[in-house]
Image (spheres, rainbow, N blue to C red):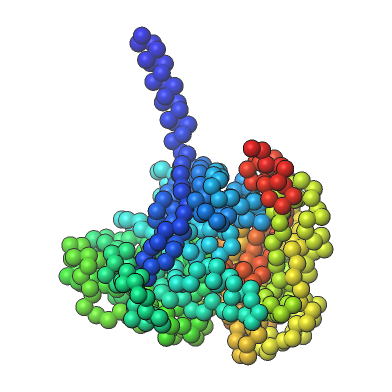
Amino acid sequence: MSWLVTWLLCVFAAMVSAEAGVRRYKWDVKYEFKFPDCYRKLAITINGKTPGPTILARQGDPVIVEVTNGLATENLAIHWHGIRQIGSPWSDGTEGVTQCPILPGDTFIYRFVVDRPGTYLYHAHYGMQREAGLYGSIRVLLPGGVAEPFTYDNDKSIILNDWYHASTYEQAAGLSSIPFVWVGEPQSLLIQGKGKFNCSKLATPSSNPTACNTTNPECSPYVLIVIPGKTYRLRISSITALSALSFQIEGHNMTVVEADGHYVEPIVVQNLFIYSGETYSVLIKIDQEPSRNYWITTNIVARNATAKTPPGLAILNYNPNHPKRVPPTDPPAGPIWSDTAPRLAQGVAIKARQGYVHTPPPKSDRVIVLLNTQNTIDGYYRWSMNNVSFTFPHTPYLIALKENLHHVFDQHPPPDRLDDFTTYDIYRVVNNTNATSSNAIYRLKFNSTVDIILQNANTMTENNSETHPWHLHGHDFWVLGYGIGKFDAENDPKKYNLANPIMKNTVVVHPYGWTALRLVADNPGVWFFHCHIEAHLYMGMGVVFEEGVEKVGKLPSEVMGCGETKAFKKP
């Protein structure tokens, strides 16, 4: 029998070896009452938690996530934010673009490879579900034996979020109404899913004493336990629905070393400005007075929300001090919310680390100028690019293009720039009577180099221009430059950083400003590019790029089943 035992052990060892790099997760998604800021609200949880479990993998690992939709009345899709989905565009998790949604009660299996180390996110990508709590971290490590270009003793992930008490249904109803009802400022800021709302500020106190309870352990401050003398890598991510944030740790400098999965030439900051969809790694040295704890704070910037949304607070716990020991000082005040200059300066200062520079192509084959405007269309408030507001088709683009269902979306491409862009006044409310809605897409020549200019303008409110974080699926892009004012196609490209620009998947465009990006259309598929503010995306602030879709392999039937693909899905 020994030969049989030996043979079985060899087979088992081979199976374990083959599976060693595969990261498997099984998630049940459902609604549960939670108290993240002490106020009782239905939140979307993964295996009972929000934020959901961290996905931990090494570069090159296959990841398999089995998702069961336990939301009794809602569809579902989950996007793997920052994962490029090379060879698996149907797993991008974008309902209406790359897949049909997961129906209530159904199970869908996402399969993809994490091809680069770094800090990433996942979150819902159906309706406005992301802000109901469906989000989490993805941490991709280097292969064993490969060193980072910096050293640290421990590795922690922290997600920043804003939190609304109104449901996504209430918010969507207001955004879709005449008269228009804006979502307003969030009630709280959460650090790793924990915040604190002042229950005495409830406009109408509930007769239920448990509806808002500041003693609920679910909303006790997040505590980051550290050991004096050590250096920590903090992976800071923002998944806010609306807010731009400043993040700081009382008494400690932070050295920025990574942004969106790419190494950064180290810069030291006291305030880290971070926008929805961005991820950063910072190093902190635990070198302050060890007998006390310190505040971790986050504040809203770029919006005048200080009177409506209190700062988010957490505790940096110097071990062995008690983790609930409150710091003896007041939390540090955040930067002035309206001061754009330091936020712009941080963006300009972040450059690719020496030795890890990926030089962009020296010139582009095509330039697309996206003028961000706010309009009314048929009486409804909409966000638009070049006066075209995005709408989703009933049949996802990836399936429609692979199955030659060209009639299911508009075949007339949106404009590469507004005809009157050179004379458009970005500083005043413009009556864009020609604004329209469309589900047309941009078709990019495969392997071509494309420049995208994001240009901000005035909203429909006098003297107001908003901050927009833009996220591109399926790609990283080079950030060539930022500017305040109107983009000058003749002179501004001469100032582009072509030597060591950082690559990112999410970037901000500042009020009355512009941001220039460059990408290579080398990932076959259909990819969403949109503002990462939930309400703005809901109101049409996005575009879709197609490239090399004929090179995409056979689509799994599981992504089908909606629109004109109902008959394509196999039982």
Quadrant of the rendered structure where residue 287 is?
bottom left
- Residue 345 coordinates in the image, percent (x, y): 51, 78
Establish if 515 lies above or below 356: below
Residue 390 position, x and y percent, is 70, 67
Taking the spot 22% from the left edge, 73% from the top edge, the residue there is: 326
Q: How many marks?
A: 0
Left or right for 274, reference 548:
left
x and y percent of residue 502 in the render?
55, 64
Which residue is drawn at the image coordinates 58% and 50% (left, top)?
103
Q: Residue furthest top?
A: 1
Q: Is residue 525 left or right of residue 252?
A: right
In screen coordinates, is 62 left or right of 521?
A: left
Residue with the most extreme front position = 207
Q: Quadrant of residue 212?
A: bottom left
In front: 40, or 197?
40
Q: What residue sits 44% from the left and 21% below the top?
A: 11
Please indicate, yes or no, whether residue 526 appears anywhere in the rendered image: no
Instruction: Inspect this view and state whether residue 43 appears.
Output: yes
Name above or below for residue 51 compared with residue 173. Answer: above
> In the displayed structure, does residue 250 sit left or right of residue 324?
right
Q: Residue visible at 23% across and 61% down? A: 227
Q: Quadrant of the C terminus?
A: top right
Q: Quadrant of the N terminus?
A: top left
Q: In terms of depth relative to the viewer, which is nearer, 262 or 495? A: 262
Position of residue 356 relative to residue 483, above or below, is: above
The percent coordinates of residue 442 (x first, y second) are 75, 61
**Position of 42 relative to 66 (above/below):** below
